[in-house]
Amino acid sequence: MLAVLWVLQEAAQAAEPGAPASPFEVNPGLFVWTWVVFGILLLALWKWGWPGILEKTIAREEKIKGQLADAERLNNEAKAAVAEAQRLQQAARAEAQQLLAEAKAAVEKERAGAVEKVRHDQEAVVERARRDIAAERDKAISELRREAVDLALGAAAKVIGTRLDSEADKKIVLEYLAKVETH
C-alpha cells in the first residue's frame, strides 16, 4: 500500500503545473464538470438507455416466468404420467396374478378330470376283468358239468352195462345236476 502512495506522489510531482498535487486534493472545476457530465449521461441513459434495458429485463422476466410455468406444467404432466404408469403396472400385476390363479385353477381342474378319467378307466378295466372272469368261471363250470355228465353217463353205463348216448339221457342228468346245485 505504501508503494502505491509513493507511486502516486511521484506521478503528482512529475505532473504539469496547475494539476492537483495529490489524488485526494479537491479541484472545484473538475468537480463541477464531473457533475455536468454525470447529469448529461444520466439524462441520456434515462431517455434512451433505461427504457431498452427495462424492456429487455421485463421481456426476459416474462420469458423466465413462461419457462417456469412450462416447467411446472411438464413436471405435473410427468408426475401424472408416473402415477399412470404405476397404476398400469399395478393393474398389470393384478391381471397377471388373476391369470396365474386362473391357470392354476384350470390345471387343478384338468388334473382332477384326468384323475377321474383314470379312475373311471380303472373301474372299467376291473369291471371288464370281472366279467371276463365270470364268463371264464361260467365256461369252466359248464365244461366241468359236461365232463361230469360224460363221467356220470360213463359210470352209469358201466353199472347198467349198456351204453347211454342219447340226448335224452344227457338231459336227465343235466337237470338233476342243476337241481342239486340250487339246493
Image (tube, helix red, strand yellow):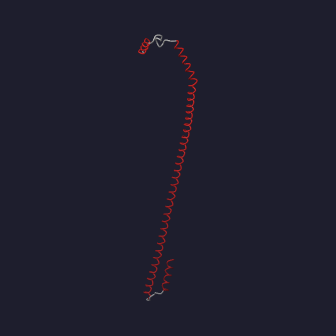
Above or below, 159 against 40 in this view is: below
Above or below, 1 against 112 in this view is: above
Between residue 22 and residue 109, name the one nearer to us: 22
Above or below, 52 against 89 in this view is: above
The spot of residue 67 in percent (x, y) is: 55, 35
The spot of residue 41 in percent (x, y) is: 55, 21
The spot of residue 69 in percent (x, y) is: 57, 35
Q: Quadrant of residue 12?
A: top left
The spot of residue 147 in percent (x, y) is: 44, 80
Position of 14 with respect to 45 (left or right) is: left
Position of 55 with respect to 114 (left or right) is: right
Quarter of the figure with the N terminus: top left
Mark count: 0
Q: Quadrant of residue 61?
A: top right
Above or below, 2 against 133 in this view is: above
Q: Residue furthest bottom?
A: 162
Q: Residue furthest left?
A: 3
Q: Residue furthest top?
A: 17
